[in-house]
Image (spheres, rainbow, N blue to C red):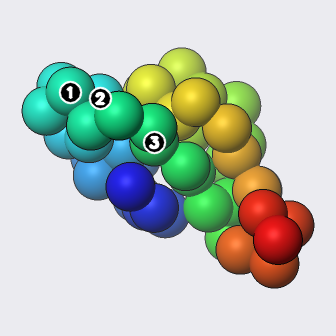
Amino acid sequence: MFEDALSGVAAGRAGNFGYVVGIDRLGHAEDLRRNGADVVVTDLAELL
């Protein structure tokens, strides 16, 4: 799943989604990781 909100990343992790991608739009990469993101990108194009 793709999510930019900390609560959304945490919900994805709690919901056992296969892979949680955090989208860091506000400079909170470490917070996204701490909340369960498997990987953090600043732009979805980084995944291409």
Which one is earlier in the sequence, the residue at label 3 or at label 2?
2
- Please name the residue that numbered disc 2 is placed on: 13
Task: Give the number of the disc on residue 31.
Answer: none
As helix, strand or loop, the secondary structure at mark 1 comes to loop
Q: Is residue 18 left or right of residue 4?
A: left
Mark 1 Cα within 10 Å, few/some/many (few <14, many 20+)? few
Distance from Cα at disc 1 to Cα at disc 2:
5 Å
Q: Nearer the viewer, residue 1 or 27?
A: 1
Element at badge 2? helix
Seen from the viewer's position, the closer of residues 10 and 20 is 20
Would you name the residue on which mark 3 appears? Answer: 20
Residue at image point 56% right, 51% down: 22
Are discs 1 and 2 less than 8 Å apart at CB? yes
Judge whether residue 25 can be spotted in this image: yes
Image-quadrant location for residue 17: top left
The answer to whether residue 39 is above or below residue 48 is above
Q: Residues within 10 Å of mark 2 (few under 14, many from 20)?
A: some
**Left or right for 22, reference 7:** right
User: Is residue 10 among what the camera can see?
Assistant: no
| Mark sitting on residue 16 | 1
- Kindly report the distance in space between the C-alpha atoms of the residues bearing marks 3 and 2: 7 Å
- Who's the residue at 67% across and 38% down the image? 39
Identify residue type, mark 1.
Answer: Asn
Rendered residue at 43%/27% (across/down): 35
Judge depth for marks 1 and 2 and give the one in front: 1
Q: Position of residue 16 (x, y in %)?
A: 20, 27
Q: Is residue 42 above or below residue 20?
A: below
